[in-house]
Amino acid sequence: MSRLARPADRLARGTYLAARHRLDRTAAWIAKGRRNDLTGWKAALGCILRLLALLISLYLLARLIRALPALMWLLSGAWLVAAWRAGKPASAEPSEKPSREAPATAPGEALRTLLLEVMGEADAVHLATVLAHLQEKGHWRGRTVTDLRRRLAALGVPHDRSVKVAGVPTWGVRRKHLQEQPQTPSPAPPQETSPEASTAA
């Protein structure tokens, strides 16, 4: 029983993490369709088009699977591989390489700088977008928005679940709250020195 329990637990944990990872990345991809130079429904038109493209793709995939049921074996195998990799215990994961640049910056301030960078000219940013940015840079693989929320809370960065970007309210950070952040160092010791790595401590 114990010999099967460990791989089963890894697959279960990996399935959850892989699903959350893909949902977060999909939400971030849809949110990037918003035009900051427009207002009203025109600003959200890009998000709507991306959502429609996603729905059409899922519909076509469902039709393809109905036409070729054997394709499910290939998709199931690919998902099991992804879940197995995502479920790798944190203790066994290699530590992220520190950045070559090592500015003497407190982790809270480094994270604030990163959030403003990802936010760009907008007034707010969704945590799913921030997480996708981190993972594109090679950080926070297998982590979720919940993990990022805990990191923000530990560093005292204000965030809430009603932040609207592209007309969609979800967990995010507002620019005005970041500008109100004190410049004092966070008591949490940094694990990394780059802005992205400081969120992964």
Image: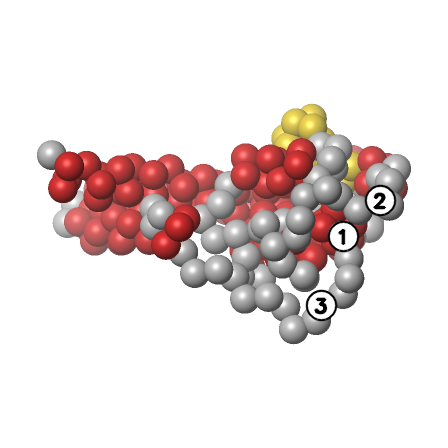
Q: Looking at the rendering, which quadrant does residue 97 occupy? A: bottom right
Q: Tag 1 or tag 2, which sits nearer the N-term?
A: 1
Give the percent coordinates (x, y) of residue 28.
Answer: 59, 46
Q: Residue furthest bottom?
A: 100
Closer to us: 183 or 164: 183
| Amino acid, disc 1 | Ala
Residue beneath label 2, please? 184
Q: What label does residue 67 carry, if any?
A: none
Q: Tag 2 or tag 3, which sits nearer the N-term?
A: 3
Does the CB distance between marks 1 and 3 fall below 8 Å? no
Disc 1 is placed on an element classified as loop
Disc 2 is placed on an element classified as loop
Number of numbered tags placed on the structure image: 3
Q: Mark 1 packing: few (<14 Cα in 10 Å), some, or many (20+)?
A: many
Residue beneath label 1, please? 106
Measured Cα–Cα span from mark 1 to mark 3: 11 Å
Closer to us: 80 or 74: 80
Give the percent coordinates (x, y) of residue 62.
Answer: 30, 42
Does the CB distance between marks 3 and 2 fall below 8 Å? no
| Amino acid, disc 3 | Ala
Q: Residue at x 70, y 71 (%)?
A: 101
Q: Looking at the rendering, which quadrant does residue 42 occupy? A: top right
132 w.r.t. 45: above or below: below
Give the percent coordinates (x, y) of residue 172.
Answer: 68, 36
Measured Cα–Cα span from mark 3 to mark 2: 19 Å
Does the CB distance between marks 2 and 1 fall below 8 Å? yes
Residue beneath label 3, please? 102
